[in-house]
Amino acid sequence: MGYSKPLPHELDSFRQMGDPVADEVIQRMNQDPGRPDVRALFSRLIDQVDIPSQELPSSLLEMVQELRIPEWADQTLIRKSEEIFRRHGPRILLVLYFKSLPTLYACARGAEVLLHTGRLTRTGSDSQIFARRIAETGKFMISVCGPNGLKNGGLEVIAKVRLIHASVRSFVQRGNWNKNEMGVPINQEDLAVTLQTFSSSVIDGLEASGIRLSADERHAFMHHWKIVGTCLGVHPDLIPDSYHQGCELRDLILKRQVAPSEGGASLTHALVSFTAPFFPKRLGRPSMWIIDYFIEDELAQAIDLKSNLPWYLRFLPETLRKLFSWTERVLQRNKDLQGIMDRLSYLLTNGMIGFFNLYDTRFFKFPNALRMEWKIEAKDQDNE
């Protein structure tokens, strides 16, 4: 039997469910008398999800090593999806940061968990902590979508993310956490909507920026993320088969979860602050109006974006839509103008890679094929 849209009461049940496999691994480690410093390990994992697997305790290493691509995975579709990422990766990262993440921040209960997660490490100021979390999201996307990503370390990254999620569930629920009202931290409903913001929402964001994927390309991209979702421990009943099913599930969950919150506003402010240095100073803070362009009014209100936008920027979203549409038609005739359309995307990508170099991320291997394709600069971008 194939996927069918869950009913509201089923989603309520999924809010009380975590990831049984990863949760059991963390529980066993917590009960082991000779366990390592769990908090120190968690802090290191969350700061550096691509830490070499051999440096993990044996109790965690086993799960990392045993994760496999599902037997039903179609390698032809995976390659097609990887080609989409090769061609449009910088634009996809732009959508990820300025559409997908703000959408998640608009989900009040999920935003509260994200705030808890960032502060659990206690390894710096809030701005430093959230900047690293935001950067790790881009690294995750590159790891699983890059050339042979799932076979080339992507599965290890996915396994470590599952362990981080399980650690968050363990740590957060030790405090004053209202499970009945909030659900289990990083529960299955939250995982499901996150998966869709990385898949169906990215497809929507690409189209909004002038890149319309064909039906076959949409199918390939969704199939790729169905594999990622399965490996991440998302319940099969919450992983749609098609783009349209994904949009339907995403919108259903957003209708249930979107609400104004201080957490959502704080996380959005951290995102804007993190990306601001990537763009020329003369542009001001373009992150705010790019977010405003990509997301709906209800989401913008939930993250308190509208009140922070100058009145004259309220006209930019429609202007951008027309610009993107016009530019895409021009680019089909003149590839030399590609820089006009992709400038913001490349500035963001270069800035993000430059940020990686500021921290101890020597274990992250940025694929050479993508570096050449995307024209990534060898050193940090000068935005003066």
Image (cartoon, rainbow, N blue to C red):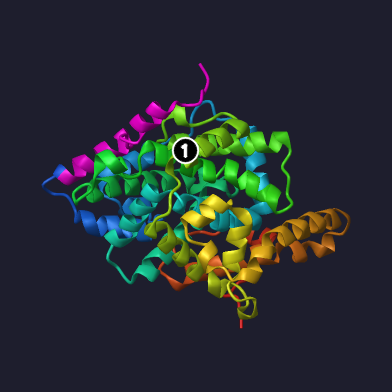
Q: Is residue 211 left or right of residue 283?
A: right
**Rendered position, 181 above or below 331:** above
Name the residue: 75% across, 57% down: 324
Name the residue: 39% across, 27% down: 10
**Rendered position, 375 above or below 140:** below
Image coordinates of residue 40 in percent, x first then y, are 24, 59
Which image quarter is the C terminus in?
A: bottom right
Classify mark 1: helix, strand or loop: helix
Q: Is residue 367 visible?
A: no
Q: Which residue occupies the extreme right position in the image? A: 333
Image coordinates of residue 108 in percent, x first then y, are 40, 50
Q: Which residue occupies the extreme top position in the image? A: 1
Q: Is residue 3 left or right of residue 92?
A: left
Q: Is residue 189 visible?
A: yes
Question: Looking at numbered disc 1 in the image, what kind of residue is underneath it?
Answer: Ile
Q: Which residues are magenta?
A: 1-30
In this orientation, which residue lies closer to the viewer: 336 or 271? 271
Q: Which residue occupies the extreme left position in the image? A: 33
Would you say residue 317 sits in the magenta stretch? no
Image coordinates of residue 74 in percent, x first then y, are 59, 30
Q: Which residue is mark 1?
A: 253
**Numbered-mark total:** 1
**Rendered position, 204 above or below 16:** below
In this orientation, which residue lies closer to the viewer: 271 or 215? 271
Image coordinates of residue 278 in percent, x first then y, are 57, 72
Tell me the crowding category of disc 1: few under 14, some 14 to 19, or many 20 or more residues within 10 angstroms, Cα based: some
Q: Which residue occupies the extreme bottom position in the image? A: 384
Tell me which corner region of the image, top left, top right, bottom left or bottom right, holds residue 223.
top right
Name the residue: 50% across, 35% down: 252
> Is the magenta region chiefly helix, strand or loop?
helix
Would you say residue 10 sits in the magenta stretch? yes
